[in-house]
Image (cartoon, rainbow, N blue to C red):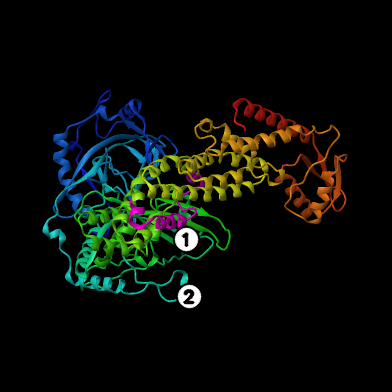
Amino acid sequence: MGRDASSARSTLPIDSLHVEVRGVGALGFPVPQAQARQLCAIARPARYGRGEDTLLDRRVRDTWEVPKSRVKIDRRRWHRALGPVLDRFCRDLGMPDGYELTADFHSMLVYGPGQFFVAHQDSEKDDAMVGSLVVTLPSSFTGGDLVVHSGTGTKRYRSSKSALSLVGFYADCRHEIEPVRSGYRVVLTYNLLLWGEPTAAAADVDAAMVDGVASCLDEHFTTPMERRWRIAGPPEDPPSRLVYLLDHEYTRRGIDWPRLKEGDAPRAAVLRAAAQKAGCDVVLALADVHETWSAFEPDNHSWGRRSRRRRWDFDEPEGEDDWFGEDTSFDAGGTSDLDRYELDELIESEVTLDAWTEPEGGPARPVSSSVADGEVCASTSTGDLVPYAAEHEGYMGNYGNTLDRWYHRGAVVLWPRPLAFRVRAEASPTWAVDELTRLLGDGEEDAAGEHAASLAPIWADAARGTTPEPTFLGAVLDAAGRLADADLAAMLLAPFHPSAIQPEHAEPLVRLGDTYGTGWVHDLVDGWPAAAPFERTADHLRWAVSLPRLCDPLAAAGPVGLSIARTMARRSWRDLCGTFKQRLSLTPPSRAQEALLDLAAPMLGLLEAAWMTRDAELREEVTAFLTADAGGTDDLLACTMAILRDPAARDPAWLAAAGLDQFAQHCRTRLEARTSRPPRAGDDWSVSLPSGCDCDLCHTLGEFLAHPTRPVFEWPIAQAKRQHVHHRIDDAELPVRHQTRRRGSPYTLVLTKTDELFTREQDARRQDEADLAWLTASGMHA
């Protein structure tokens, strides 16, 4: 058997299989074309999977699928013949000793002339599934070859007209069915399932190789990493882990030590034994790899490709094959149009881990961890494998043609045992907090403190990369309070944002205040970042709306809780105030007004929180901000009216206490002033230019706009100056049409005031009158 046998082939006599199809009868071998056409008549177009979706697209898969319920196979005869073939496939595919393969029938397919299935991978439909088996029934057809692409090459399988053709391959192998040129290709497909327990011999590894790898591990974990992009400065700390990329792809159901595939299994066994010798922990993991390569078309450039991925090539005992460090290449087999590009240099590589399996086995546990360049190695360069997706980018920026390629790879992850808690916490912060909680519950405060302290270098990034579920933050709050160490508690909570705090967190917040003092809580909340990477402005606005639900249990918990509730409300106001100022500066004005209206509900929530916490100073500060005249611009008037119109604002029990009566009086005063102004005269064409630029162009523009009897202005100016005037008019949404007369030099910019000047003011007056009438009818005024 050669290295990395990802597929295997066999044949069986035609009398090994008897198949009957309801509506067609017993199939003859070779399958007559008349029967093949009958099969097509009772079949349905075959679908295919993409992620969690099942799709029908004949540009991807064009074949007929006979309903499984119609197919009857003489199982006794078939299993008697198939058993020895599966035993041979088990050996040929490199399955560990002590295991056996079984075949679970999946479907009957018929490919007629012109039908095909583009390159794809089979999903692992069962926890025990490791591969697929294709049984091609003997028939007369041309084309329709089964092409299997593995990490180290491509194999093409043709069927026989006089025998059953069987091909087994790993589920991670991309494979395709080339178009049938004539006749009909009829196949049975099976899921290959792996069962059994490893024998002692399966764990045997070469002692000399284990010693060599253990020495490499010692060197890896004591050598400082080079700075990325060769940035000047002292070396970084030694890596905290090693991620060795395997050659095959696995799923969360399939990543398990006994089920590693040919080529991967012996290497993983060596690494596992070396880890034990070097005092390291080891897990199996799933890795997502994204590489960006410079690329070229072979017709235009010379061949060549190199990977900057660090390789591990270990010396082996004399006489052994160099399986651990073998360098390979292959022809991708024309699976896509991108195959015409040749890889040149690796520009950038990104590796992330998303699940791992412990040495004792069990379900793969979700993790999320980016891997540094200095932590990754492989015997087979990722560039020499078949990607599951690729995307080409033409010449742009500082690069020529680039090719992005995405891969799924299994991995063996190792780290020194003293770093175990930190490494595991970086991959799964939720696990780390659960472990701290367990230790604290068992009375092991010293161990919990040591573990918590070890998180300091990685906790900020790890916690921010975790979805802020209430249960996760609740566990962090609880652990922080029970550590009885103010600095460690602050470190654990520092990465979060106020919008993650929910009503169910009131009790652990009060315990934090009891343990460390309300001043400590104030400093913690005040120091939280304005926006964590996972947080958007909308999250904070939703939090402000729900703020009363948090302040209610806090205020009811006594002086400590009341102080914390006020801290939360003031932090909310700080963020909302910044959002107001940012949205006031938006252009055009209609966009700013629409954005400001979205702040009405959050502001009402804040005002209710200020009332619940009896914080008169906060209420007065918010009221002063929203009722500021700001030179008569009334930018916040629409938002303030929206606050008053909210049904929650109509409760007389807290109308005055929350300061809403002051809002109502302010709005009434401003609306009366606006509606008392005389309407614009029919011949008044004056327009105000908002402030923002004092250049000569804007001065001239302002003079024209302010002129009451001049509706048109012809202005010969150069292109760049015209563009500036265009932007000023459009950004302010002025009722002015701008056109360029392209004659002479420079061209002439023609500005024309439009009738919208009058209709806008009429619409605004009608709205003001309606708002004033509503205030009067509601009684919401002093």
How packed mark 2 is, by other alpha carbons closer than 10 Å (few <14, some 14-19, many 20 or more), is few
What residue type is disc 1 on?
Trp
The quarter in which the C terminus is drawn is top right
Whether label 1 touches label 2, CB < 8 Å? no
The quarter in which the N terminus is drawn is bottom left
In this view, 243 is above or below 719: below
**Magenta part, dominant SS:** helix
Give the percent coordinates (x, y) of residue 533.
46, 53
What residue type is disc 2 on?
Ala
* Left or right side of 361 for 383: right
- Residue 526 in the magenta stretch? The answer is yes
How packed mark 1 is, by other alpha carbons closer than 10 Å (few <14, some 14-19, many 20 or more), is many
Q: Secondary structure at mark 1?
A: strand
Give the percent coordinates (x, y) of residue 326.
31, 66
Q: Is residue 152 visible?
A: no
Q: Residue furthest bottom?
A: 234
Q: Quadrant of residue 683?
A: top right
Segment colored magenta: 511-540
* Left or right side of 584 for 732: right
Q: Which residue position is annotated with label 1?
A: 293
Closest to the observer, 355 or 763: 763
Q: Residue furthest top?
A: 23
Residue at left 43%, top 36%? 57
